Image (cartoon, rainbow, N blue to C red):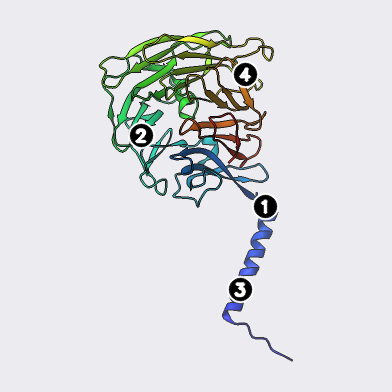
Amino acid sequence: MRRFRLSRVGVAAALAAVVAACALSAAAASGASRYALARTLRWVAFSSPSDGVGLFQTERYPVSGNGPVRCVLYTRATTSGGVSFGPAAQTLARTDCELGAAFHAITFAGAHTLLAYGSGLAISRNHGEGWEPVRLPGALVALAAHGQSVWALVTRCRAYAPRCALSLIRSGDGGQHWQAAVPQPPVRAVPGLDVRVAQEGGDQLLALAPDGGVVLAWPTLRAHSRVIYPTTVAVQSLAPGAARWVSATVACMSAPFATELAVAPDGARLLACASEPSAGEQLKALAASPGAGAAWRVVSRACVDFGRCRGGLPSSGYLGELYALSARTLFYVGSRSSLAGSFDGGRRWRVWPQIGADASGSLQVSFINARDGWALAQGVQAPGTSSLWRTRDGGERWRRA
């Protein structure tokens, strides 16, 4: 009879196989969930037509649908205008997806300085390769950068407070060091709902003018019922070196959900407002001002007869972000909304249904000059579905990056 000898390696391998088989049997017997991964591009920031950084999120979710979904946030660089991205850099955050992400956007604050922001703030001094947390005198509500000049709104408001006091702070070195702005805005109390929405990437309450001035906007009145009616928005402006804020009151349909402020490179100021969303539709209105201290006028009124109005902002989809390339050329994106743009100052709008499509959504639109821009769309029905689009002619035509 032949005898077989097993080496120590062979014994170890055999035992490992038995243990693995037992573990699989136990998992199957207990009905343990299998997990899958989905990677989504959440935001992009570009410093040139070719060089940029993408903010990515990887979700680990149970195939069965039962159990927590874990999220990891990180950045990846591109040198091809978004056609492809390099390897993942240092992890920004790990969280339970249901609790929301600490960072929902990134922006350049210098040649190689990046800021990641949401309810928190992190800084990278090496083009997104490594990240460090930034301590602020309160929770971050809004942020805007123009070169190394960065401004932010913060609050010490407790969660779910009916009204919150905001403070304006500024940094002159790309977000590394901060100090209180002088003078502070005359109106700083806003509903707690606005604070939470802004921290989650909703209401844009802060924008910077091309001359370095600061513009703030938030509703002065919010509806507490479900009746939709026009309300007013307080717009406050501070010119560079000025000792006093200039305030204006703008009539806008803003009860009670979205307020989006944008300042174009030519100095024009645009304010888009939207009412309570319903079944994929939302009333929207647009007001404009040619510059600081100039009077505001309503460009497009809300269409109260859904689907039957001609011109004006489309009632389909929700308002998420407004971007002004000039006084005449502007775009907006949002949940359950395709990319929409206007080339006549907001009177007539064009929709690109392939960028967002119905039942999904568009996340971001941005430009680095008058011609080069990007739009980001994400499907809400399936994890990991996002697409980046590129324009080289100021938004007239869009193609997949």
Residue pointed to by mark 2: 147
Q: CA distance from mark 1 to mark 3?
A: 26 Å
Q: Nearer the viewer, mark 2 or mark 3?
A: 2
Contact (Cβ within 8 Å) of mark 3 with mark 4:
no
Q: Amino acid at mark 4?
A: Pro
Residue 355: % across, % down: 62, 32
Label 3 sits on residue: 13
Instruction: Say which quarter of the image contains residue 311.
Output: top right
Q: Distance between the Cα atoms at labels 3 and 4? A: 65 Å
* Quadrant holding the C terminus: top right
Give the distance between the C-alpha atoms of the residues marked 1 and 2, in whole angstroms. 56 Å
Discs 1/4, front: 4
In the picture of the structure, the residue carrying the numbered disc 4 is 314
> Which amino acid, by three-letter code, is at mark 1?
Ser
Image quarter where the N terminus lies is bottom right
Depth check, front residue: 216 or 62: 216
Q: Which residue is mark 1?
A: 30
Which of marks 4 and 2 precedes in the sequence?
Answer: 2
Residue placed furthest toward the bottom: 1
Task: Determine whether the residue tagged by mark 4 lies in a helix, strand or loop.
Answer: loop
Mark 3: which secondary structure? helix
Q: CA distance from mark 2 to mark 4?
A: 34 Å
The relative height of residue 288 versus residue 82 in the rendered view (above or below) is: above
Q: Give the residue type at disc 2.
A: Gly
Q: Earlier in the sequence, mark 1 or mark 4?
A: 1
| Residue 365: percent from left, percent from top | 53, 31
The vertical placement of 55 against 212, above or below, is below
Q: Are marks 2 and 3 in contact (CB under 8 Å)?
A: no
Q: Along the line of sight, which residue is nearer the eye, 76 or 366?
A: 366
Which of labels 1 and 3 is toward the front? 3
